[in-house]
Image: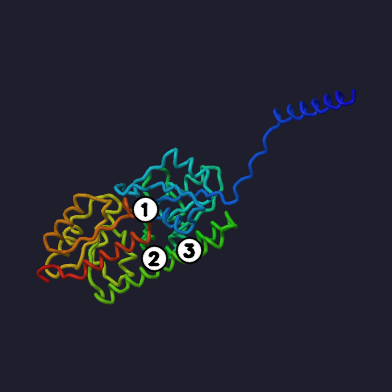
Amino acid sequence: MPFRRAAVAALAVLTVAGCGSATQTPAAAPPAEDAAVPVVASTNVYGSIVEAVGGDHVTVDSLIDDPAADPHSYESTPADAAAVAKAKLVVVNGGGYDDFLPRLVESSGANPTVVDVAGISGLVPAEEEHAAEEAPAEGEEHEHGEFNEHFWYSLPTVQKVATQIATDLAAADPADAAEFTANADAFNARLAELITRAEAIGKAQPGARVAVTEPVPGYLVQTAGLTDATPHEFTEAIEEDTDPPAAALQETLALFSGDPVRALILNAQTETPSTNQVRDAAQTAGVPVVEMTETLPEGVPDYATWMGGQIDALAGALGTRPSGS
């Protein structure tokens, strides 16, 4: 019965094939070629810069993003350590500002590429570089050198950082290297416009005197061609979270009488009785108060928009002389 034998044979083949398909392990899906590069940044300022350069090809974890927090007193968390352990790129301000992050990198056991803004900036004196690299233990206070570690207010430095980030992302994701370079170029072009706007302030008001509560905006003040008239002892004490010497406080308050400064630039993230006294003195004298921050405020979409708004606020403040001057 040839037909029956053929049918049985066919049925056997189907049965074997069916058993094979039931036990066969599905092939693993190939990894996505353009999987996002995991990045950790100490603050959302640097996180925003990474996003501007990396676009959809990065996932960014900014460890400090609370606009009401003082980054100087930040303490890392287990979630921060977990993020660092997975990161391929870490962006750290350096210069003693965010020492917790280099410690996390060291203890993570991972080997991410680290973008050290202090080293890139060229703004740290040679004798300070070694001291800045020696981070204090968790919970210890760091000592600031004579340099200003708030590098993100130096627009030329941020341009260098964007270029370096593009290079390092390209090493992690070569397929998208051209896009990283193009994004960095576009970002840096926006910053070039901001530099021109800042320099225009000084051209219109050459050497205009201003007061600051902390050295946070120092590089922007320099770019704008303005003169910081605040006693160093006052700003240093506020930055180190200590009470300024009485003489320094009185000298600062005196900046708002007689021939007053043109504006007060106040760090909105650090409020103390001394800074409140200074704000009150400025407002009493009719001196404009310009608030600047150390991290992106809530609702501000990106670094360039944030910095541009602060430059415009400073220009607007200096466009009107204090009352009685």
Report the front residue among 71 and 184.
Answer: 184
Disc 3 or disc 2, which is closer to the eye?
3
Residue 66: which disc? Answer: none
Residue matched to label 2: 155
* C-alpha distance separating marks 1 and 2: 24 Å
**For the residue marked with disc 2, what is the amino acid?**
Leu
Report the front residue among 243 and 177.
Answer: 177
Residue 319 position by quadrant: bottom left
Disc 1 or disc 2, which is closer to the eye?
2
Farthest residue in the right direction? 1
Q: Quadrant of the C terminus?
A: bottom left
The residue sitting at 40% across, 67% down in the picture is 190
Residue 261 position by quadrant: bottom left
* C-alpha distance separating marks 1 and 3: 33 Å
Q: Are marks 1 and 2 in contact (CB under 8 Å)?
A: no
Q: Position of residue 8 (x, y in %)?
A: 83, 24
**For the residue marked with disc 1, what is the amino acid?**
Glu
- Check the image and report above or below for 273 versus 265: above
Q: State the SS at label 3.
A: helix
Report the front residue among 271 and 195.
Answer: 195
Q: State the SS at label 2.
A: helix
Residue matched to label 1: 143
Residue matched to label 3: 184
Q: Position of residue 118 (x, y in %)?
A: 44, 59
* C-alpha distance separating marks 3 and 2: 14 Å
Residue 226 position by quadrant: bottom left
